[in-house]
Image: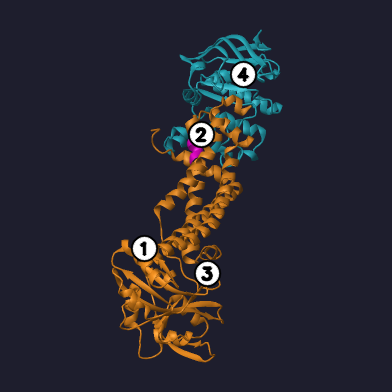
Amino acid sequence: MRSRINLYIVEYAINSLLRQKYKTLFIGLVLTLLIFLLSSVFFITNSMKHELQATVDALPEITVQKIKAGRHDEIDVDVIDAILELNGVESAVARVWGYYYFQNAGVNFTLVGIDEYEEQYKKSFVAAASKLDFTKPSMLVGEGVKRVMDANYYKEYFNFIKPDGSLKRVDIGGVFKAETELESNDIILMSKESVREIFDMKENKATDIVVRVANFNEVATIASKIKLLYPDTRVITKDDLKISYQNIFDYKSGIFLALFTTALFAFFIIIYDRASGLSSEQKREIGILKAIGWRVDDVLREKFYEGFVVSLLAYVVGITLALAFVYIFHAPFLREIFSGYSQLKTSFALPFVLDMQTLALLFFLTVPLYIAAIIIPSWRSATLEADEVIR
Amino acid sequence: MIRLVDVVKKYEVNQSQSVVALDGINLEIKKGEVVVLRGSSGSGKSTILSLIAALSKPTSGEVVVGDERISKLPDSFASDFRRNTIGFVFQKYNLIHTLSVEENIILPLVPINLDAKEIKVKLERVLGMFHIAHKAKQLVKNLSGGEQQRVAIARANINNPQIILADEPTANLDAKLSLSFVEIVKELKAEGKTIVIATHDPLFFGLDVVDREIEISQGKLL
């Protein structure tokens, strides 16, 4: 009979919480808030990591940039011919791209030029190239760009201001979608010809050249060969870019770590407070229960249920709120810290990444700790002689 | 029924000092007997009740109730013993004020996990027996002293224990309510229960219902 779950003890525990409803509510709210904050940080970090990994995976193996006076300059398209002659090079494509600042919205768009018959250096561009109308000035825009343009009444076309002050009207031909929103969100795809016109670039010039290598192990060798061929270039490998992305990510993670530590610190203060002792009223109640025949394990079971109900409820509500905050409301305030794109990039939605490990970590970091903090002082009182506790 | 053999109880004041509450007590109480422990405050009578109820353990000596050497019982067995054998009416009643009358009364039954029907039968029996059925749903904190005492007595009797221990039961009651407690003692005695009352209230001295009065002073029986 005693092995069954004793619903009377569960009922007593719930009533005990209700009897101290303001205290329970306050502790529950603080716990919920902390779990919400911790889980929001985890969810954003996970989503950003996922987004970043996908972006890094989509990067070209080698990027060649012309450097003039220490700054990035336009590169001659002829360089491609020499690069293609290097052993191990599979393809080399001149990229025409740049940032266009849209003053009305205060954001930067990334304009990328593609050619209809050229080999596309990104998988996502292949489908886009077939969708884009090359017979007239037309473009495909990322979701974020579309939102910004819609908000500024550019629903069917957009007027780009060229360096000489004249306008270039380009029709909006559709929405461009890549594997990740971070990658496609602020992008505008159009013909290389249109991009050159908007940025006033000559036909034999490109922003940079991306090189694909047949054998991944040869990337470093080919990169050094290109550097030897063209000493005025900067040759960036995928690994270099990975490191630089990772550095930005780590820096931002540091800010999040500070937030995380603060939330955790607050949580441990609550735990310490709960674990450091019981009020005289609580001790007296334990003494009474023991005096009328409750065993130590009955008292601890009752306290376990109390802690479990509060912490599990706080956990479920905290996680649910964090999921809504991050994935429905797009984590206002917190996301900006991480992405750092608030002003210059169009906003993007965080991809939904639900990592069970994260949920388990949060669970074990909060629920058992809180229960332990409730049980330990109760155990101390319950194991004293009942007579001593009542007196 | 109840035997205390060479019982000594010391309370530690600090690491080097202790107070002797009971000093070599030998006492035997028979089944169905009503015994009054008389003595001034601090004489040790409450400590004797605590030892009989296994609420504390003697420093030396032995406490035997029935066949059970309760001074040697592990904590969990001591709890079971209290629940099944002892009904304790504390001086300050020791009720949980934020619970209702019936919730307080059934508290000793909570860990046993009985059927709801069985609990109801036991509850109704004591509510009727101690005339508090009309207050069953009220919070204990809203009751008078006499009513609270009845709740405490009802709780002590919910498991129909063989032994009732009452510590200064009339200390917080007026004369009329004190007399009604005596009536309750008579009823319990009629049921064959062994009753030990620790008191310095003269009301209990020389009462018909009391079989024996034992004087205690400075931890020793006189």
Separation of disc 4 and disc 2 at Cα?
24 Å
Residue at mark 3 to residue at mark 2: CA–CA distance: 54 Å
Q: Which residue is mark 2?
A: A299
Which chain comes out orange in the rendered image? A
- Spatial separation of the CA atoms under disc 1 and disc 2: 67 Å
Chain B representation colour: cyan
Q: Chain of mark 1?
A: A
**Of helix, strand and loop, which one carries label 1?**
helix
Badges 3 and 1, same chain: yes
Q: Are marks 3 and 1 in contact (CB under 8 Å)?
A: no
How many residues crowd around disc 1 within 10 Å: few (fewer than 14), some, or many (20 or more)?
Answer: some
User: Mark 3 or mark 4, which is nearer to you?
Assistant: 3
Q: Nearer the viewer, mark 3 or mark 1?
A: 1
Left or right: B9, with A210 as reference point: right
- Residue range in magenta is A298-304
Which quadrant of the structure image shows residue A46? bottom left
Q: Amino acid at mark 2?
A: Val
Residue that numbered label 4 is attached to: B47
